[in-house]
Image (spheres, coloured by chain):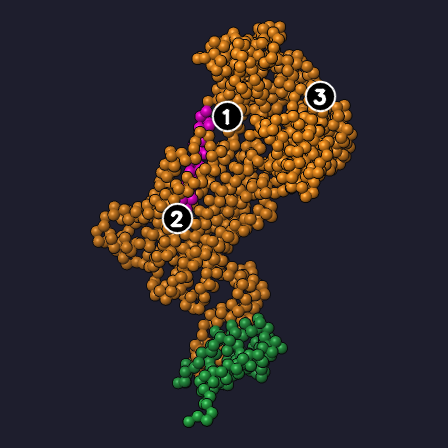
Chain colours: A green, B orange
């Protein structure tokens, strides 16, 4: 493990959302997804392969994403995942939920200051 | 190792997953090299970051569907691998399952064929059997309707019954082609085949007109007879065949599957005209109208009978009227014993299951480390349980497969050894889809039940503990569970052995009964003299007397005679008698009535108590004479009955003619006429020479005392009959010993089977006890070694092991005995002179079980005695 910063373990469910969200930009293979998640979170979120691949296969089974074999830029044969129509719909829902959730949590963490106070 | 299912879709998916993860690793390595790490370091780091590839693959695969076919196949594959790794264990477990499932499948095959399968007729549930009998006929009698009532009932309007027909099993002699042959036949109402719903395969069935005398010389052939006698040619129709010396015209052939009543080779019409002097009771089959319940049918039958001329004036309560499913007629006698045997055999399966469960527990204990590792690697408990259970289910199914093979063979043996008629519908007893389904279901359930407890127990422990210790753990739960299984096995074995013990004792009692005659050295055979060849009593008497004379001249024959109702035979006449000077005979008093030729008593070694046997002095013109059995004489001329000689009796209670009085000339022992369990009976004997009643002497048996065996003497007997009359066929040639054995064959069969099951149960229980004790000793090698090192003598060590043995046996024994007391009651009807709670049997069984358990404990005890303290203390224990 490198870096002094401790990493946050992902909650189940959150990972699904993050995968769907990340795949929104472009189809991606497992390694690429792990890299992107790590990069986009400034190295805060580290996805364990033991969680990533089960999640990918679970989402695939739920038909939210689908997969096909392709070649990477470097010629490596890779399994590339891509959002399905159902996945896109689900992402909208998850995203709304997520926003409501973060707002709610933010509200709890930083309670609004009453107007005209003090 | 390559498994047959290697090349399926799931495997290619497996390969894809491996490739996918491998690609991930490759890319990670490549990225690290790009960043400047050396290839070796990059590879190491990438691997470390990735984690355990196998584990990742496994948890990912689980996403493919928890209960899916793939997961199932995967589990089976794991299980198969696991079993392959320990072939000895697998072999023992599969063999145990095979025994249990095989025995049960065999028994179920019989029960299925005999009791559960529908009868081979259209809408068999609509077929019923009608019965209306005097109450004193009913208890063990077959259902029947009198020949006076049947035609009236068939003609009466009915809502409940669509049609009805009577039948009567018969014997006929077929002559003309080869040697005379005695055939099992049946006389049937013209519409019997219609009632049953089976048309003729070729030709036609009977018409109502053919029930009338004069036009009733027509015959329907069974498929088998048609093939044997007519080479299966359709031209057989219209030809003539000689039955009982009379020509019959073949009008049709029934399909091969038609076998009713069982074993009939041909069918002739049954007259619907009643015999004016007698009431003959015959079974009557009816087909219920659609939507009529048996209850409603019974009500209608009762109310109709109240209006019929032949039954209207019967006193209420003197008759028993019944409507029962037809299948009852065929299986009623066998049903209780088949259920008892099924119960017994299910115990064997339970014991087998307990045994395998125990083996699994022991195996799980030795695999604790492996299981711990897998749990530590992230396999969920449920997943491991699933795998362990799959393993046991797989073993059970393998055992089931072997068991089915055993069953196919076992059923064959069972049917071959069963006494004739004991297992009804024998031809329908086959291994069919229902049997296979049941065997598979039982295997699966047995496997699951056996597997679930050990699996639960062995995964309950904290994996860290399993990993930390090297294996010297006997967990409390497992240990307790093992003990429970062994105690349960022993208890079940006790119950079964008690059953077997009771039946054996009862059988021994039965064999010890003195029937009043000596069967060894007696050969007997029957003849039926047809009305065509022997129209009147004189012809019959002359022929039979000549047969007896000629039999006496056969080389090797010491004595010969004739009797109309052979002991343990199928028929017997019972009647009342009136003694001169006794005005009020006991109410309902009746005795067996038999007709014999001179020399019967000496041939059968029946003791002549006083007076003389019939002889050549007794003729048509001489004084009518009779012989009574000892009990009859004692009853009326107490105390010793000798006063009977010279006294007179008659069968005609009202105003007998002179020739209707018979003088008693002899007294003989009572004999067991109907079978050893029936006891000895009172009887009155008449001389053949003075018998006028044709039906009494038309079907008779000859008895021959000879040192030769039945097969050896048979050709001589045949030629005697053949020379005197070539159209008379011999039937039922057998030694009287065989007849005696056959009379207790039912009990012998039941006893043999239950004893075999009990022996199996004891064997399995012994193996189970041995397994637990051996494991115990092995697991305690360390402890026992310490004891020995500290100065315990080998006697002390033995005491420890014996105490462990008794701790298993005593509870098993007690629970078993209590169970036996509760369960053996079902045997009541099968037992002869033994109560179901016979103390001697219980004690003996307890003793046998104790002995078996101690023998099972012997090897472990010897091993314990030989423990070398040094080795024991140094080494880890080795698994048994």
B414 w.r.t. B186: above or below: below
Q: Which residue does the numbered mark 3 point to in the structure image?
A: B245
Please state the total of marks drawn on the protein image: 3
Seen at 58% across and 9% down, the residue is: B661
Comparing labels 2 and 3, the label whose residue is closer to the camera: 2
Q: What stretch is highlighted in magenta?
A: B488-513
Q: Where is residue B145 in the image (x, y as percent from the top left)?
A: 65, 29
Q: Name the residue under label 1.
A: B678
Residue B459 seen in render: yes
Q: Does the magenta stretch include residue B496?
A: yes
User: Residue B808 location, x and y as percent?
Assistant: 35, 47
Looking at the rendered structure, the secondary structure element under dot 1 is helix
Element on which disc 3 rests: loop
Q: Which residue is drawn at 66% across and 33% down?
A: B303
- Say few, some or many: other residues with alpha carbon within 10 Å of mark 3 (under 14 / 14 to 19 / 20 or more): many
Look at mark 2 in the image and give the residue it sits on. B486
User: Which element is circle 2 on?
Assistant: helix
């Amino acid at each position: 493990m490198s870096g002094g910063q401790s990493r946050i373990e992902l909650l189940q469910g959150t990972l699904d959302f993050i995968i769907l969200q990340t795949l929104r930009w472009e189809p991606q293979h497992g390694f690429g997804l792990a890299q992107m998640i790590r990069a986009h979170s400034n190295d805060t979120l580290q996805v364990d392969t033991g969680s990533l691949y089960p999640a990918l296969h679970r989402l695939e089974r739920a038909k939210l994403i689908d997969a096909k074999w392709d070649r990477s830029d470097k010629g490596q044969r890779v399994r590339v995942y891509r959002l399905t129509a159902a996945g896109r719909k689900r992402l909208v829902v998850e995203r709304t939920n997520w926003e409501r959730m973060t707002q709610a949590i933010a509200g709890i963490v930083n309670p609004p200051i009453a107007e005209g106070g003090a | 190792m390559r498994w047959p299912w290697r090349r399926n879709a799931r495997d290619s998916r497996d390969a894809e997953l491996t490739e996918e993860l491998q690609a991930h690793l490759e890319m990670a390595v490549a990225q690290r090299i790009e960043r400047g790490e050396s290839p070796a370091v990059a590879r190491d780091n990438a691997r470390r970051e990735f984690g355990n590839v196998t584990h990742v693959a496994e948890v990912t695969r689980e996403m493919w569907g928890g209960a899916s076919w793939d997961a199932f196949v995967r589990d089976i594959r794991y299980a198969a691998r696991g079993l392959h790794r320990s072939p000895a264990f697998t072999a023992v477990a599969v063999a145990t399952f095979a025994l249990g499932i095989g025995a049960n499948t065999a028994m179920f095959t019989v029960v299925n064929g005999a009791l559960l399968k529908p009868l081979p007729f259209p809408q068999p549930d609509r077929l019923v059997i009608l019965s209306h009998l005097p109450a004193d006929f009913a208890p063990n009698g077959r259902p029947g309707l009198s020949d006076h009532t049947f035609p009236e009932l068939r003609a009466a309007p009915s809502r409940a019954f669509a049609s009805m027909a009577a039948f009567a099993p018969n014997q006929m002699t077929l002559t003309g082609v080869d040697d005379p042959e005695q055939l099992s036949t049946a006389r049937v109402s013209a519409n019997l085949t219609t009632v049953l719903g089976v048309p003729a395969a070729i030709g036609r069935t009977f018409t109502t007109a053919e029930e009338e005398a004069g036009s009733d010389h027509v015959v329907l052939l069974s498929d088998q007879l048609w093939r044997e006698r007519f080479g299966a040619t359709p031209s057989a129709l219209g030809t003539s065949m000689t039955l009982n010396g009379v020509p019959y015209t073949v009008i049709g052939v029934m399909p091969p599957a038609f076998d009713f009543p069982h074993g009939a080779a041909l069918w002739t019409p049954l007259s619907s005209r009643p015999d004016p002097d007698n009431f003959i009771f015959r079974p009557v089959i009816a087909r219920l109208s659609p939507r009529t319940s048996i209850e409603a049918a019974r009500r209608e039958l009762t109310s109709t009978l109240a209006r019929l001329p032949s039954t209207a004036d019967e006193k209420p309560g003197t008759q028993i009227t019944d409507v029962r499913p037809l299948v009852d007629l065929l299986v009623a006698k066998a049903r209780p014993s088949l259920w008892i045997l099924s119960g017994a055999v299910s115990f064997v399966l339970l014991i087998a299951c307990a045994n395998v469960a125990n083996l699994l527990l022991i195996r799980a204990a030795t695999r604790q480390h492996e299981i711990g590792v897998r749990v530590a690697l992230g396999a969920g408990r449920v997943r491991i349980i699933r795998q362990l259970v799959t393993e046991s289910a797989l073993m059970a199914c393998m055992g089931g497969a072997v068991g089915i093979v055993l069953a196919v063979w076992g059923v064959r043996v069972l049917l071959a050894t069963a006494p004739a008629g004991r297992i009804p519908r024998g031809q329908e007893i086959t291994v069919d889809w229902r049997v296979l389904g049941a065997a598979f279901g039982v295997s699966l359930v047995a496997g699951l039940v056996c597997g679930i407890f050990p699996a639960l127990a062995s995964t309950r422990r904290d994996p860290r503990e399993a990993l930390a210790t090297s294996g010297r753990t006997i967990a409390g739960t497992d240990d307790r569970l093992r003990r429970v299984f062994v105690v349960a096995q022993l208890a079940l074995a006790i119950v079964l052995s008690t059953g077997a013990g009771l039946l054996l004792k009862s059988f021994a009692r039965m064999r010890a009964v003195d029937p009043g005659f000596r069967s060894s050295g007696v050969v007997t055979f029957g003849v039926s003299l047809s009305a065509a060849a022997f129209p009147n009593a004189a012809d019959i008497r002359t022929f039979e007397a000549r047969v007896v004379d000629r039999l006496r001249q056969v080389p090797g024959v010491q004595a010969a005679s004739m009797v109309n109702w052979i002991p343990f035979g199928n028929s017997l006449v019972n009647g009342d008698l009136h003694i001169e000077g006794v005005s009020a005979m006991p109410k309902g008093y009746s005795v067996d009535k038999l007709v014999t030729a001179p020399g019967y008593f000496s041939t059968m070694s029946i003791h002549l108590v006083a007076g003389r046997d019939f002889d050549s002095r007794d003729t048509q013109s001489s004084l009518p004479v009779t012989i009574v059995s000892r009990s009859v004489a004692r009853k009326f001329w107490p105390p010793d009955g000798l006063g009977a000689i010279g006294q007179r009796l008659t069968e005609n209670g009202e105003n007998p003619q002179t020739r209707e009085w018979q003088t008693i000339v002899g007294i003989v022992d009572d004999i067991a006429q109907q079978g050893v369990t029936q006891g000895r009976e009172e009887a009155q004997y008449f001389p053949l020479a003075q018998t006028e009643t044709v039906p009494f002497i038309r079907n008779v048996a000859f008895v021959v005392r000879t040192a030769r065996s039945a097969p050896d003497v048979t050709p001589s007997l045949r030629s005697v009959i053949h020379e005197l009359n070539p159209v008379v066929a011999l039937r039922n040639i057998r030694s009287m010993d065989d007849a005696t054995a056959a009379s207790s064959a039912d009990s012998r069969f039941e006893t043999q089977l239950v004893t075999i099951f009990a022996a199996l149960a004891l064997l399995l229980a012994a193996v189970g006890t041995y397994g637990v004790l051996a494991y115990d000793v092995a697991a305690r090698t360390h402890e026992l070694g310490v004891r020995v090192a500290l100065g315990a003598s080998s006697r002390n060590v033995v005491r420890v092991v014996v105490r462990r043995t008794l701790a298993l046996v005593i509870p098993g024994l007690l629970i078993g005995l209590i169970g036996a007391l509760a369960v053996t009651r079902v045997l009541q009807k099968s037992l002869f002179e033994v109560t179901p709670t016979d103390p001697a049997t219980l004690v003996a069984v307890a003793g046998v079980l104790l002995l078996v358990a101690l023998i099972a404990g012997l090897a472990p005890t010897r091993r314990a005695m030989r423990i070398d303290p040094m080795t024991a203390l140094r080494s880890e224990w080795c698994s048994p």
